[in-house]
Image: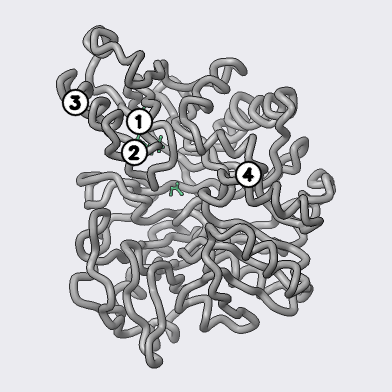
């Protein structure tokens, strides 16, 4: 069969690579893809943007695509799955209504409260209802979030009341466009974060391997928030007991609640969890898709056929399948362009990819493009180098060997991905 992957980042490279490995799959199309997907066996890039829903529907129909997997949130929030369904096309992802869990943090907070799922206390404001005195009554630091999609940049941890009020006002004034029309002001939570990602058909759930992302740009969790600078799987903070708690207190009530609200959810569901000192798994955010870069290490460990799992989900029988995992750990290090997460320089030649291809592990491309046979940088997050090992420490060694063999002017990466797990292993 033919599979279509929508998107152009590292997550989509990993999805395409994994689907192409299936004996059931004759060809994988990626719209629009990158230089990495262009080089994968059985994979072909198609120049259609991930936001161009009518063109994607037309592509799936003309190419007789039997399974489409959506990588990024924007087309999901815009309703791509509804459009595919209307055209009789199979597309793995949530419809527009349940995708609001990511598309509107105000909606997500209201949902969490209504269904009694643990999360930080918060209040939602518009420009008209904003009450600076509310902020003055709260403890600092305090978290200010643009409600809509802001590519991971709409969250500010304000150290003072003055900063929090100024941040909210900048959001109302249009700093993040329409995404800042509503602002969620939330209690600051401490603890250790984990990414808990599941596949669901609306009723049944297959949890994927646990993982931990590193959102800050610089070593030691300093610097600005990013889309993610590296991730590894499994995450030791998700012990078997914590896994059971997250399933019982977060995932199951979420899936049941969405169905009860008349908006059943099919697709990948990503819960960003802050595990409090007392073990409470607080939901920081929902994403209506697979994580980036979590997808890269998680799929390196997945032994099952992803297309079989997606087909089972689309047919409402996820209870009949299970995901098998490589017992080894996987760790991915993101290589970013100078300037990330702000404006970055593009068009630098990436050297060393051939040497890296001869080493163990796998380099997934994100912001890259091909020009006259050379691979050029073409975005903020450029590559994600993933290693495998019998421990996170070993996986990390393999990943950094890949990173150190690759060069371009201004390339930067964190040197401490996986440090919490490595400390635990010592
Ligand atoms: P979000 O997009 O809501 O996940 O926020 C991005 C990042 O900001 C999270 O991964 C956390 O590291 C941090 N963050 C968000 N909300 C809170 C909170 N209530 N307390 C502490 N940190 C937070
Ligand atoms: N790595 C965080 C995300 O995908 O949102």
Q: Helix, strand or loop at disc 1?
A: strand
Is tag 2's residue or tag 1's residue first in the polypeptide sequence? 1
Residue at which label 3 appears: 166
Residue sitting farthest toward the bottom: 372
Q: Look at discs 4 and 3 and give the one toward the viewer.
A: 3
Q: Residue at x 46, y 64 (%)?
A: 9
Q: Does 252 sit left or right of 89 as displayed?
A: left
The residue under label 1 is 145
Q: Quadrant of ligand 1?
A: top left
CB within 8 Å, label 2 to label 1: yes
As displayed, is residue 226 above or below residue 166?
below
Quickly name the residue at label 4. 198
Q: CA distance from mark 2 to mark 3?
A: 14 Å
Residue at figure coordinates x 68%, y 28% from the top left: 258
Res. 41 mark = none
Separation of marks 2 and 1 at Cα, in angstroms: 6 Å
Check mark 1 vs ligand 1: CB closer than 8 Å? yes or no: yes
Q: CA distance from mark 4 to mark 3?
A: 37 Å
Label 2 near label 4: C-beta < 8 Å?
no
């Amino acid at each position: 069969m033919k599979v279509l992957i929508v998107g152009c980042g590292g997550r989509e490279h990993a999805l395409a690579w994994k689907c192409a490995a299936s004996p059931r799959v004759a060809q994988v199309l990626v719209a629009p893809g990158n230089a990495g997907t262009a080089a994968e066996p059985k994979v072909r890039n198609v120049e259609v943007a991930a936001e161009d829903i009518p063109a994607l529907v037309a592509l799936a129909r003309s190419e007789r695509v039997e399974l489409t997997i959506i990588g990024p949130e924007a087309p999901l929030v815009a309703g791509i799955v509804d459009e595919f369904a209307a055209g009789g096309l199979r597309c793995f992802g949530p419809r527009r209504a349940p995708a609001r869990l990511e598309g509107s943090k105000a909606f997500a907070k209201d949902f969490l409260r209504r269904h009694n799922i643990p999360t930080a206390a918060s209040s939602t404001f518009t420009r008209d209802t904003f009450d600076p005195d509310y902020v003055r009554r709260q403890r600092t630091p305090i978290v200010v979030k643009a409600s809509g999609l802001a590519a991971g940049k709409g969250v500010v941890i304000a150290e003072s009341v003055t900063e929090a009020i100024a941040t909210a006002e900048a959001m109302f004034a249009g700093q993040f466009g329409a995404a800042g029309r509503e602002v969620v002001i939330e209690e600051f939570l401490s603890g250790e974060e984990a990414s808990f990602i599941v596949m669901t058909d609306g009723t049944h759930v297959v949890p994927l391997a646990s993982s931990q992302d590193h959102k800050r740009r610089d070593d030691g969790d300093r610097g600005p928030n990013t889309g993610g600078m590296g991730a590894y799987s499994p995450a030791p903070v998700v012990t078997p007991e914590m896994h059971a708690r997250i399933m019982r207190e977060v995932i199951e009530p979420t899936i049941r609640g969405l169905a009860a609200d008349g908006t059943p959810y099919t697709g990948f569901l990503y819960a960003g969890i802050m595990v409090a000192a007392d073990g409470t798994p607080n939901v920081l955010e929902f994403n209506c898709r697979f994580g980036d870069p979590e997808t890269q290490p998680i799929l390196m460990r997945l032994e099952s056929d992803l297309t079989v799992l997606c087909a089972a989900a689309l047919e409402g029988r996820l209870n009949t399948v299970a995901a098998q995992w490589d017992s080894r750990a996987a760790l991915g290090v993101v290589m970013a362009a100078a300037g990330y997460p702000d404006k970055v320089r593009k068009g630098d030649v990436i050297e060393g990819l051939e040497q890296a291809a001869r080493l163990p592990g796998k380099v997934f491309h994100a912001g890259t493009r091909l020009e006259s046979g050379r691979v050029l940088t073409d975005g903020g997050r450029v590559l994600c180098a993933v290693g495998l090992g019998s421990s996170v420490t070993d996986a990390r060694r393999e990943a950094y060997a890949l990173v150190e063999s690759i060069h371009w002017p201004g390339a930067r990466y964190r040197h401490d991905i996986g440090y919490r797990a490595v400390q635990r292993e010592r």
